[in-house]
């Protein structure tokens, strides 16, 4: 039978739809008493108050956990009779139990993995149904960072016929890649839930930009109640290769026909690219050497908590792209599917990481409690879920696993990598080890003749790539220690900074805290950390120290900075009242710290001249002025028109510096190449705060109840100069089809609510996040503060034709 030319209609209903609207929620303390309506995704912890006594502790963000119940009542049309209906949760933190009409569908302890349940057996077709989800995040601490609580990722309803492509049932690989021609191998799992065998036609089609590139079909006998693996091999002529610059995406479309009728259509985006890790040349993508310029990120979205929002993720990636980042490490857990979709589309490489611990725990109630029962299933689901994403190029089976030093670490490593390779052998397996060799010598220098003994995991043969967390002083010995296995710096740096705050002098490097296991009492009394790149954790290194080494040696394939963005929890070097991290190159509100521009000057082709700090100091105070620059031979600095001299980077320098006694006025920097001005930057001494400035990242957004406009609020003096020390409290008012969904200022010590309608400025800035409603129109945002000239901003919302929910 052939259905190639079938005249029958090919239209079938959309198989997977969002199922996020019109849920009800009640917190465990009032179970069943006070339900209130909401839409998912939802993180109840972010709405709570900071308190040092919350069991999550300041390391977990000092916000409440607890138990929550979700309920959704929905009608199932009678047309669903004979259909298969599934529900998919992209992630619930944590310990979820899902019930349909009172029947338990399943429990899932892991807070990050997605899972699907078959609703069909308990569904009232043509009638009302109730789905109930219990979420238990009461046993804390269970995380070393802020986890969030609730159904914080998307929920989907999938409706299919009885014969259909299984959940995560496609696998697309590209065994041979060249510019002239590439091979595409497709594996499709087809399930027949009928009581009788059926003959089916399975057709796989490769599409590029909606155009058919290749098509194959085969007739198969689908046995009743069985799953069948169908494979096809396609050839793509002159393929557009996926790369970080041109992330070309193809789609594998699978169609299943039974009795000449189209019964299922399923789409799998994929990319065609080849890559390799070389022991000498590092990382090679499509035949070209590429340094991996990565960041580690946790999953929270600052003021939005962990409730996933595609625009918030996209904004993070845009900001990172501006700094030259080309890779993300999903520290230390399966990410939201939307993050991988964005990385596929925007051209970011992803080191996809699954676990922060195995059998040995790191905090009292963490995943180690569920390890024995669940790790196989969670790992299998993780690989099946993510293995078609072209962005994913490394699997990490764990971060700083305590067992890495023992034989059982080697055994588990082998067990996990075997599972991974069985499901996907197209990507290398690694782990973030600390370090992969045995060393007691912190100052281990760069010259050894003898190989050091590997830790048990590194020596187990389980890993294709040797992953280093920190220990940058041992990098240069890598090729002696592991001559056969390529290198990746899975985690680096752990430099610390508060945006906008500077300690003089800038040229002394501090390692804060002194030790990871001891309380640190010698920091700044207000829990600030200098934003000159002069402070790092003792296990880490400053931004410049790290990049200088990675840059120099080809075999060092690349690095993942700890971290791109600040995150809630882990406020090293401090404890409470701090409640969020200092590690980010970008603060929690999304404002870059100064080191961002060092990377930009090195990692992008854009011309950079960034001078800092601000120019508001006490008269006579000696202040260090740094400049990051590129595409120029020198920078000349002027104070009130008088030259303070020219400076040029020498050797492997990454910045230049002047030490200048403060006098109010204008600092001007000019970068020059071959005697011609390239860029000019000025910083002026600001007067007292007098006005508010508002700048939206986007002035027009979709009227889809999800899209966001991130509005930066800056305080300025009467002439419009930024006031770098301003702390004025700004009140927000909003009218029109939108609402305020978060406020922040990047201060790691603030205990103000992210959900308030006001925020104090922190070093001159704060952020307000506006979300569209479902109707198009004009949102008016007003910002006011006592003694300051108010400001208004208009955000337009338009109907989005691609709207899905
Ligand atoms: C690493 C760890 C990260 C984070 C970081 C802070 O050792 O893998 O999760 O804790 O230290 O410096």
Image (cartoon, rainbow, N blue to C red):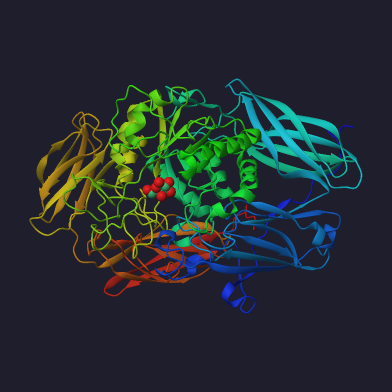
The quarter in which the C terminus is drawn is bottom right
- Tell whether 322 sits left or right of 428: left
Residue nearest the observer in this picture, 22 or 538: 538
Q: Residue at x 79, y 47 (%)?
A: 11
Query: Does residue 596 sit above or below 73 in this rendering?
Result: above
Dividing the picture into quadrants, the one containing residue 694 is: bottom left
- Tell whether 790 sits left or right of 75: left
Furthest residue in direction bottom, as rendered = 33
Total label count?
Answer: 0
Query: Does residue 379 sit above or below 566 in this rendering?
Result: above
Furthest residue in direction right, as rendered = 196
Query: Does residue 469 sit above or below 519 in this rendering?
Result: above
Residue 695 in the image: x percent, y percent? 38, 58
Query: Does residue 684 sit above or below 741 in this rendering?
Result: above
Residue nearest the observer in this picture, 769 or 52: 52
The quarter in which the N terminus is drawn is top right
Q: Is residue 249 visible?
A: no
Q: Residue at x 31, y 34 (%)?
A: 473
Residue 469 in the image: x percent, y percent? 40, 40
Furthest residue in direction top, as rendered = 180
Q: Residue at x 77, y 51 (%)?
A: 13
Residue 457 in the image: x percent, y percent? 49, 35
- Tell whether 661 sits left or right of 67: left
Q: Is residue 439 visible?
A: yes
Residue nearest the observer in this picture, 729 or 624: 624
Dividing the picture into quadrants, the one containing residue 109 is: bottom right
Residue 350 in the image: x percent, y percent? 51, 39
């Amino acid at each position: 039978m052939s259905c190639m030319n079938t005249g029958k209609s090919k239209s079938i209903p959309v198989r997977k739809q969002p199922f996020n609207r019109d849920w009800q929620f009640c917190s465990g303390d009032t179970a069943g008493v006070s339900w209130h309506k909401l839409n998912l995704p939802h993180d109840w912890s972010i709405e709570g108050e900071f308190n040092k006594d919350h069991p999550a502790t300041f390391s977990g963000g000092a916000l409440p956990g607890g138990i929550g119940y979700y309920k959704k009542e929905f009608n199932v049309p009678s047309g669903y009779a004979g259909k298969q209906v599934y529900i998919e949760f992209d992630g619930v933190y944590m310990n979820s139990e899902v019930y349909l009409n009172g029947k338990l569908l399943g429990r899932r302890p892991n807070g990050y993995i997605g899972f699907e349940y078959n609703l069909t057996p308990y569904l009232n077709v043509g009638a009302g149904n109730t789905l109930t989800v219990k979420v238990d995040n009461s046993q804390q601490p269970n995380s070393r960072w802020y986890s969030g609580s609730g159904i914080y990722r998307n929920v989907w309803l999938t409706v299919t016929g009885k014969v259909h492509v299984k959940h995560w049932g496609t696998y697309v690989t590209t065994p041979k890649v060249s510019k002239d021609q590439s091979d595409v191998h497709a594996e499709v799992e087809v399930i027949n839930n009928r009581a009788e065998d059926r003959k089916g036609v399975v057709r796989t089609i490769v599409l590029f930009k909606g155009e058919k590139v290749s098509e194959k079909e085969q007739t198969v006998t689908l046995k009743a109640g069985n799953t069948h693996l169908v494979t096809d091999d396609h050839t793509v002529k002159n393929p557009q290769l996926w790369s970080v610059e041109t992330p070309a995406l193809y789609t594998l479309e699978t169609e299943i026909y039974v009795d000449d009728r189209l019964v299922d259509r399923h789409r799998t985006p994929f990319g065609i690219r080849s890559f390799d890790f070389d022991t000498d040349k590092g990382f090679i993508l499509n035949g070209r050497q590429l340094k991996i310029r990565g960041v580690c990120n946790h999953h929270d979205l600052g003021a939005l908590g962990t409730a996933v929002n595609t625009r918030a993720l996209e904004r993070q990636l845009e900001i990172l792209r501006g700094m030259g980042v080309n890779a993300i490490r999903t520290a230390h857990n399966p990410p939201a599917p939307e993050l991988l979709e964005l990385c596929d589309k925007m051209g970011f490489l992803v080191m996809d990481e699954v676990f922060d611990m195995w059998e040995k725990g790191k905090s009292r109630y963490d995943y180690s409690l569920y390890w024995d029962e669940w790790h196989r299933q969670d790992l299998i689901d993780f690989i099946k879920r993510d293995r078609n994403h072209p962005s994913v190029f490394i699997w990490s089976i764990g971060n700083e696993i305590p067992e890495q030093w023992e034989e059982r670490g080697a055994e588990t490593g082998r067990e996990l990598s075997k599972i991974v390779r069985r499901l996907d052998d197209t990507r290398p397996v690694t782990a973030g080890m600390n370090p992969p060799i045995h060393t007691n010598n912190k100052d281990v220098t760069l010259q050894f003749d003898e190989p050091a003994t590997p830790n048990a995991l590194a020596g187990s043969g389980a890993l294709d790539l040797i992953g280093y967390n920190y220990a940058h002083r041992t990098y240069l010995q890598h090729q002696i220690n592991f001559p056969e296995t390529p290198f990746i710096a899975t985690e680096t740096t752990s430099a610390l900074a508060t945006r906008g705050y500077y300690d003089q002098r800038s040229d002394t490097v501090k390692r804060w805290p002194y030790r990871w296991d001891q309380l640190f009492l010698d920091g700044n009394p207000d829990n600030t950390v200098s934003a000159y790149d002069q402070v790092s954790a003792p296990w880490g290194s400053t931004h410049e120290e790290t990049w200088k080494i990675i840059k120099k040696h080809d075999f060092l394939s690349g690095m993942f900075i700890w971290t791109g963005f600040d995150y809630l929890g882990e406020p090293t070097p401090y404890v409470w009242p701090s409640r969020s991290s200092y590690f980010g190159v970008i603060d929690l509100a999304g404002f870059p710290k100064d080191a961002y521009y060092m990377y930009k000057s090195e990692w992008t082709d854009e011309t950079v001249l960034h001078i800092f700090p601000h120019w508001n100091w006490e008269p006579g105070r000696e202040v260090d002025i740094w400049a990051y620059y590129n595409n120029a031979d020198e920078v000349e600095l002027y104070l009130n028109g008088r030259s303070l001299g020219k400076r040029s980077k020498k050797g492997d320098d990454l910045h230049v510096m002047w030490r200048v006694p403060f006098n109010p006025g204008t600092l001007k920097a000019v970068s020059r190449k071959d005697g011609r001005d390239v860029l000019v930057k000025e910083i002026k001494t600001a007067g007292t705060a007098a006005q508010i400035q508002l700048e939206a990242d986007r002035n027009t957004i979709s009227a889809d109840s999800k899209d966001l406009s991130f509005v930066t609020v800056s305080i300025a003096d009467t002439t419009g100069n930024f006031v770098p020390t301003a702390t004025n409290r700004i009140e927000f008012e909003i009218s029109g089809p939108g609402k305020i969904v978060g406020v922040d200022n990047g201060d790691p010590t603030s205990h103000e609510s992210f959900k308030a309608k006001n925020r104090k400025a922190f070093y001159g800035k704060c952020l307000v996040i506006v979300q569209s409603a479902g109707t198009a129109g004009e949102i008016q945002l007003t910002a006011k503060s006592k003694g300051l000239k108010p400001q208004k901003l208009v955000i337009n919302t338009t109907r989005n034709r691609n709207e899905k929910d």
